[in-house]
Amino acid sequence: MILTFKVKHKYDFTKQLEQARQIANFAIKNKDKRSSKYVSHFGLKSIISNQILRKYGKNKNIKKVSNIKLIIPNQGIKLDLNNSIITIPSLKISFSYQFRYQFTKVNQIEIDNKYYYVSVTIEEQKQIKSNEWIGIDRNTNGHCAVAACTKTNKVIMLGKKAKYVHTKYSKIRRKLQRLKKYKKLKQIKRRESNIVKDLNHKISKKVVQYAKENNCSIKLENLKNIRKTTKQAKSFKYTLNSWSYYQLQQFIEYKAKLNGIPVIYIEPAYTSQTCHKCGQIGKRNDKKFKCPFCGYTAHADVNASWNIAYSGQLLAEPKSEHLIHSDSLFQKNNVYNQQLIQEGDCINGNTDIPQRATVLNAIDSRTPVALA
């Protein structure tokens, strides 16, 4: 697994970055000249100029380069693991590092005027074996992520701050656009992006830590093309397009991978409309869900997260080594087995308490309906 760490430096690389920019623009105009002998007159070391020629000489879309980083490949880097020091002989610099993960090699380093971007290969942990799941429902309104755990029978709700952040900054941006203060507008966009990124990091860390503590695998909905397929009201369009589903997904994926936790995807159809108790289609009104068949009522996102956790409609079956062989939850015909229908209100520690409690022996025994 490859991770990139950012290390702040105190050097001035203005001259080298300008040389790199000139080489990049040369590569765009002269795609057949990818040898450092053609750009030696710019004065940049050949081990760096070769990387820039390859990167920009292959790019058919870019017309001009204004911002660029110096690129140092693996063979131009010396690593001292005992003293935690990285040396770049071509630039005559060394710096110490303190990365949180053990790594096997440094792939490459990119440099701008503020940071080293160190790309390293991390050893992947052996994946856990578990039949327990954490189903995560991602949302644009309310909490960003609602996670239901089949092992603890509890729900955690994360990221309520996101909606406030988007509402606040959308008003600021509209005001700046009217005043035509475009430089300030760019700063505000960057600030909002950084806040959302930080929030997604915290959410993903909490989810993966919870999964690790309870020895659970993670299930997510496949939300690819959601912006194209979802019907959008004008008031909802901004919220949908400003929140980063994919970023949160990436953060969960890589953090889970570092901890040996499998992540799989399910079809999202009807997860928010199906009753997780009896499998019938219920009624949803904003964040309220009610099943007209069994009387179950709950927060709509909580109900959806349980559907995801117990769903058997996987896009890809988990590998056999990740599962303990027992009565499988992944039946082809039924999403829920009878045991799962009877779970919920009567189990100690459940935070998903309906407004209208149901009696265990009065649960409808009809055949569960598979999600479409």
Image (cartoon, grey):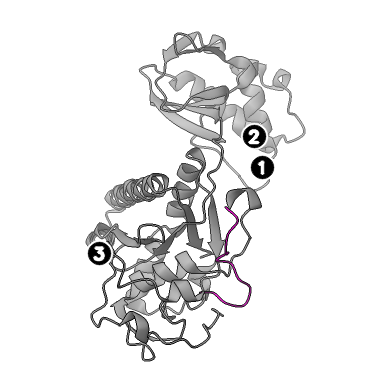
Q: Which residue is mark 1?
A: 59
Labels 1 & 2 near each other (Cβ < 8 A): yes
**Who is closer to the viewer here, 33 or 302?**
302
Quadrant where the C terminus lies? bottom right
Q: Contact, CB < 8 Å: mark 3 with mark 1?
A: no
The residue that disc 2 covers is 55
Return the residue nearer the eye: 178 or 6: 6
**Mark 3 to mark 2 CA distance (whole Å):** 39 Å
Residue picked out by circle 3: 167
- Mark 1 to mark 2 CA distance (whole Å): 7 Å
Q: Position of residue 273 (x, y in %)?
A: 42, 81
Highlighted magenta segment, given as a residue range = 324-336
Sequence-earlier tag: 3 or 1: 1
Residue 67 inside the magenta-drawn segment: no
**Residue density around tag 2, few if under 14, some if 14–19, many if 20 or more, within 10 Å:** some
Q: Answer yes or no: is residue 93 visible.
A: yes
Which residue: 54% across, 27% down? 120
